[in-house]
Image (tube, rainbow, N blue to C red):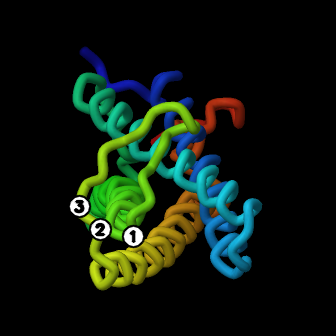
Amino acid sequence: MTTPIRYNNIAVSLHWLVALLILAAFPLGLYMSDLVLSPTKLKLYSYHKWIGISVLALVVVRLMWRTVTRVPALPNSMKPWEKTAANVMHYVLYLMMLLVPLTGWLMSSAKGFQTVWFGVLPLPDLVGKDKALGELLKDWHENLNYLLLALVVVHVAAAMKHHFVARDGLLTRMMPWLGSRKRD
C-alpha cells in the first residue's frame, strides 16, 4: 500500500466538522458564562453541551479511522525537528479535543446537571454531585479551552507557513479544494 498524498474524504470531513464545532463552542462558552441565570442561558448551556459531546464522539471516530487508514507522509523538505513537532502537536490536539469535552461533562455531573445530548439522549453522570469538585472541574475546563485555543492558533499558523512560505503542498492534504501543489 502506497502512502497517500492527501487525507481521504472521511478524514477531511471529520477534521473540518470538528473544527467548525470547536469554533462554535468556544465563543458560545465565553458568551453564555457571563449571562444571568435565565431560560436563554440554560438553552445555550444545552447547545454548548451538545456541541461538546458531538466533538467528543467525532474525535473518537476520527481516532478510530486514523488507526485503520494511512496518514499522508510529511514533505521531505521538512527538517526532522519540524516533523517531530508536527506529530507531537497532532497528538496533543487529539488529547485536548478529548479532555475539553470530558472535563465539561465531568463538571456538569459534579454540579448536578445531567448532560442530555440533543435534548433526547440522557448521558450518565460521570461523578456524583460535589460542589467543590464542580468548581475545580470548571477551572480545568476553562483553562483547557484556552490551551486548546492556543494550540489551534499555532496549528493554523504552521499550516499557513507551509502554504505561503514553504509552498510545500502540506495544506492541500487537508484542503484538497486548494488544488495540488508540487511536493518535493
Q: Which mark is residue 22?
A: none
State the residue position of label 2.
Answer: 129
Q: How far across and how far down the image is residue 154, in percent?
A: 51, 70
Q: Nearer the viewer, residue 17 or 71?
A: 17
Q: CA distance from mark 3 to mark 2?
A: 7 Å
Q: Nearer the viewer, mark 3 or mark 2?
A: 2
Residue 165 visible in the shown view: yes
Q: Quadrant of the C terminus?
A: top left
State the residue position of label 3.
Answer: 127
Q: Secondary structure at mark 3?
A: loop
Q: How far across and how far down the image is residue 96, in percent?
A: 36, 62
Residue found at x 24% / y 15%: 1
Residue 46 lies, with reference to residue 111, above or below; the image says above
Task: State if disc 2 and disc 1 touch (CB < 8 Å).
Answer: yes
Name the residue type under label 3: Val
State the residue position of label 1.
Answer: 111
Judge the density around disc 3: few (<14), some (14-19), many (≥20) Cα neighbours within 10 Å. some
Name the image quarter holding residue 35: bottom right
Q: CA distance from mark 1 to mark 2?
A: 6 Å
Residue 32 left/right relative to 58: right
